[in-house]
Amino acid sequence: MSASPSGARLAAVALLLGNVVTGLSIIGPAGMLADLAAGLSVSIRDAGLLVTYGAVVLCLGSPLMAWAVSAMPRRPLVTIVMALLSAGLLISAAAPNYGAVMGLRIATLIVGVVFTPMAASTIAMMVPEGDRSRAISFVFLGWALALAAGLPLITFVAVHFGWRAVYAMLGAIGMATTGLLFLAVPGKLRGQPLSLASWGAIARDGYICWLLFITVLWTCGQFVLFPFVGPLLSRLASGGPETVGASFAAMGIMGFAGNAVTSRAVQRFGAWRMSLVCSASMFLGTLLWAVGAGLLPAMIGGVMLWGFGFAALNSMQQARLVAAAPALSGATVALNTSANYVGQAIGSAVGGEMFSRDLLVAMGYVGTVFMLGAFIAVYVSRRGAPGEISTPL
């Protein structure tokens, strides 16, 4: 059902903020990896496993949780999920050791995994069909904001006040967001239950499966490098905490800009063309990082190009999946989120192993190969949905 324009806008803002909290819960360790390692008396690689193991839980849990909660009313669903996620963050601030932090992270993400796909399907139900691509892109600006403002803030707070203060801060923001979600999301909004036949229909749809494969490729390329951006800047270019924070800010600002530009341009050019632009930007960014490893301007320039495409490409993937099978959008968006986490798990594991073996420059080239594969896969996906080329979603 469509909500009033003002009601839809308020709900979109609340869901965007929920994605900020969810995004920082998932990628936050990347902004304070060195501080976590020092504070918990573990190696950088072990601290990076917070990302890897968290992604494993997320990739397995996303479709299962989406199926389990598909028919629940949206307001209590997103409100309860955000409340539990926030409580987990607050408890993590008092965790005594690495094992407790890991256990709390896994338990928290098992619950939090459902928020992002449900945010996309919720806003899609609240706006007219012609506005869905833009509305979904807006909600996913939360991830860009998590990078643009959240990660630099995490880096600053971790350096000056410690990693525990970061978890406490995120938990407090999450609790405030919980209240806004309760007020903004309509009480009678309810999704369609997903049957086992829904998953079978998705598995038989080659176009949808190819889109999910694209998501795995580009997130693999990103997460070979992303969790280790801070330590890599420090080791390769002698960058300090200020440089790391500025790099995350530059990436996030470009991500915000890329998503904003793409959410407008998609109405004119279609999601396929915009996906191609975004994947090309990410490929060129990781290539510049790899070729310019050790040169701070080149590495930051690479981060900016890479940042321009990442949030926007995810939004375009979600929009293409919703357009491909609107009745299955709850499942396909959840699977795309799961594909994101599959890529995160593989990429961060590969990156962590390479970092531990001191293959720091090679990490950039490995990420670039994945990004090139994603670009080629996006180009090939043109054949699956020719209507996207000439008409907006």
Image (tube, rainbow, N blue to C red):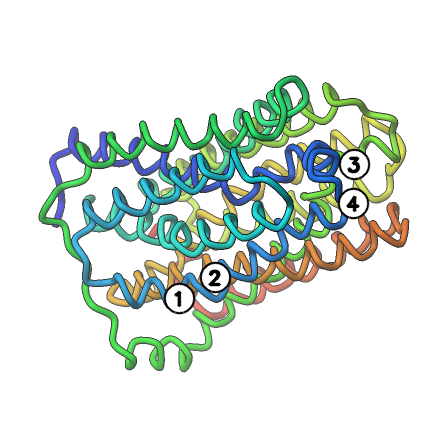
Identified at 56% across, 26% down, the residue is 253
User: Is disc 2 surrounded by few (<14), some (14 to 19) or many (20+) residues within 10 Å?
Assistant: many
User: Is disc 4 surrounded by few (<14), some (14 to 19) or many (20+) residues within 10 Å?
Assistant: some
Residue at numbered disc 3: 231
Residue at numbered disc 2: 338
Picture layout, residue 230 above or below residue 279: above
Label 2 and label 4: CA atoms lie apart by 28 Å
Where, by quadrant of the figure, is residue 16 drawn? top left
Observer-side mark, 2 or 4, equals 4
Instruction: From the viewer's side, name the closer residue of 63 and 377.
Output: 63
Amino acid type at mark 3:
Pro
**Is 58 left or right of 160, judged from the image as shown?**
left
Q: Position of residue 275 (x, y in %)?
A: 52, 51
Identified at 38% across, 59% down, the residue is 333
Q: Position of residue 56 (x, y in %)?
A: 56, 62
Where, by quadrant of the figure, is residue 160 drawn? top right
CB atoms of marks 4 and 1 within 8 Å: no
Q: Which label's residue is closer to the chain start, 2 or 4?
A: 4
Amino acid type at mark 1:
Pro
Residue at numbered disc 4: 43
Amino acid type at mark 4:
Ser
What SS does tag 4 mark?
loop
Residue at numbered disc 1: 63
Q: Residue furthest left?
A: 188
User: Is disc 1 surrounded by few (<14), some (14 to 19) or many (20+) residues within 10 Å?
Assistant: many
Label 3 and label 2: CA atoms lie apart by 27 Å
